Image (tube, rainbow, N blue to C red):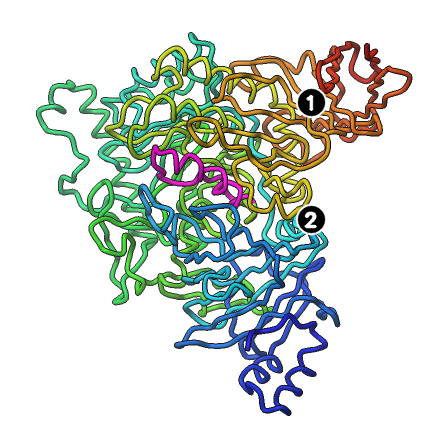
Amino acid sequence: MRPMNLSASSRLLVAAALTQLGAISGLSQALAQVVSESIGDRSVRFHASAGAREGAHPSYALLKEPEQKPAPAKFPVAPVFSTSEGKQQVQISIEPGTSLYGTGEVPGPLLRNGRQTVTWNTDAYGYGEEATSLYQSHPWVLAVRPDGSAFGVLADTTYRCTVDTGYTNAGEIRFVADGPAFPVIVINANSPQDVLKGLGQLTGKMPLPPAWALGYHQCRYSYYPESRVREIASEFRTRQIPCDVIWLDIDYMEAFRVFTFDRGLFRDPKKLNADLLGQGFHNVWMIDPGMKSRTARGPSDRPEEELAAEGPEVAKARAAELAKYEAIMASGDQADVWVKRADNTVFEGEVWPGWCKFPDYTRPGVRQWWSGLYTDFMAEGVSGVWNDMNEPAVFNVPSKTMPETNLHAGDPAMVKPNGKAQGDEAKGDHARYHNVYGMQMIRGTREGIQAIHPDKRPFVLSRANYIGGQRYGATWTGDNTASWSHMEESVPMSLNVGLSGQPFIGPDVGGFAGNGDAKLFSRWFGFGAMLPFSRGHTGKGNINKEPWAFGPEVEATCREALNRRYRLMPYLYTLFREASENGLPVARPVFFADPKDAALRSEDDAFMLGADLIVVPQMIPDGSRVPTLPSGTWREFEPTKNLDIPKLLVRGGAILPMGPVQQFVGEKPLDPLTLLVCLDDSGKAKGTLYEDAGDGLGYQKGEFLLSTYEATLGDGVVTVKLAGVEGKRARPNRPVTVRVLLHDKVMEGTGTDGQAISVKLK
């Protein structure tokens, strides 16, 4: 018998009836034992029993232990708890026609019906569509009913968990997890958008990033020596290709020792970073969790004769870096910060530097120690930090990670659902803490950067994460492959991460593993420039993959794609602000335009940016794919015959704020401001523009400007006026260009911001 969706008030009645009829007594007993509490708007947390609630671990997914109230008498979703082979499982039945999404970072299509995912953070280089575990864990499913209403289900467990979205039974969602009994949180709402807002309320929203992080990022494994970094920066500026950030992978380090610099390859990182900033480039440098623990030469150490040829000054600088590193390791030993084996000895595993120790980031004191290590590092002019290999990845073992029997101390102060601090119950094995290891690492990183630069917004990128980790850092879809299939999958992967609470997401544009070719790179770059996190990246040994690397034609496409992104930066920044306020993703599936339209539910070649813009790439070489798009008025913005540049469609009723082309964010003021107007059938349109300093926390004190513009059509004239203002930031005295997008032409008018502007339609 399949589990049923029951209101809270119906469970006891059904349980009694089933027992009376002699039907499946185990189900009736389970229904009778379930306890629940309301933990937010439209959100209910369910436990298998009172005992399960008492023994439940604190939540790493939730921002904090929420205020609890009695569950509503009628709630439309009822999880059914049971055990199977010693594991707790939870089943939720779904009505026919329900579409399932989410489950975090997963390969394959947007629509997750009939799929199975295993939440176990995994170093999954070059993963295929059949992979069930990647770098992040989101035990979360978003269910959209046929009528467009929706609910979301979170299995609140950090253990390995199978998320079954109809692979076993098409009529249900099922979670099966290791470890003790876990609660299930259900958010029910009238739309998928409201479900995600509810998820943001519970798990926290992405902090507003610095504006430069929304620009284009250029990376490879690895840019070195320093002269190569300077060459890359010079090429971008000489070729007039917009870019904001250059990334430095592990080869900048002294033999892969974190928090050090190879003073032969990078003799003065502080000057390099300052010079880059003078050209409009910020920088991001990698820091891994594995810390070289043995003085014996490892795979990363340079040959002695090569080092000797560098001369005494470099040798002295290298010695200083090594001494600094040994002091770091000694402080770690003294503070006993390391993950332990089951026998309580310090665990060591092999990663890039050779044998390494690993900080136990589950301990608050260790995170504080880790945060302090960034003081000298950030003093070198570092803009942002990339935490990689933090699943944690371990080489030369079948599991690709540390033993599940390893020991973590945890955080005794974390509060359980019963309202009590967990105390000594915080101590647990790696099976319990594996999926949050990377999340707690970037938490410590972010806290360290924030303490060093309290007047700036930290930027942290992480490969591994757990649901709720958007509170601490951005992420990407991992070590993908330069193939047409991975190019196509990069859109639904990014969308499903967004539907799992993380708005700041994107792929390695062009593919990390393998070379690919010019056609693949150009097509991928065309729409990759429109995703929330836009970074070109490739692996060691591959061909060059900068925008100019494939010749003038591809270079022109990349320039055009990035010029579009930077002109749309005012709209994009407004969307990021919205995401930081309400938890909605920046990139959204097209069914968000009409959740009731079943024809849109599986469309994942096109995607939306916010509610007002659809990006329509061509995902197959010949451009013959015609995606299913929402009905209503959608007008193409700046049509192009270049198949590698996606179509951009503006919603009827929208006003999009735009700015001038610039080579990096903040190079030019928003002058003129362009308002792109697309009228709806009634001759009206509306849009918002968010502005602040682009960095710092002043916006939290009201130092921002949120402008609402409205357009109306009357007697053949479109009038655009300022209809609403929020914030204390002064309005610039700037010109405004209004562009009215009609079905066959664009009409323009000009004026001054804050004053009504009229455009006569001919």
| Rendered location of residue 202, percent (x, y) | 62, 54
Is 130 left, or right, of 420 in this rendering? Answer: left
Of all residues, the one furthest to the right in this rendering is: 715
- The numbered disc on residue 175 is none
Q: Nearer the viewer, residue 688 or 474?
A: 688
Give above or below for 499 relative to 304.
below
**Which of these two is toward me, 333 or 89?**
89
Query: Which three-letter amino acid code belongs to the residue tagged 2?
Result: Lys
Residues in magenta, as a range: 472-498
Which residue is situated farthest in the front direction here?
Answer: 624
1 or 2: mark nearer the eye: 2
- Quadrant position of the C terminus in the picture: top right
Q: Does residue 490 show up magenta in the picture?
A: yes
- Residue in view at x 46 percent, y 16 percent: 557
Q: Check disc 2 and report the residue beneath it.
A: 596
**Tag 1: residue type?**
Pro
The residue furthest top is 238
Residue 56 lies, with reference to residue 295, above or below; the image says below
Quadrant where the image shows the N terminus: bottom right
Residue pointed to by mark 1:
657
**Dot 1 crowding, Cα within 10 Å, few <14, some 14–19, many 20+:** many
Q: Position of residue 645 (x, y in %)?
A: 51, 21
**Res 753 → quadrant:** top right
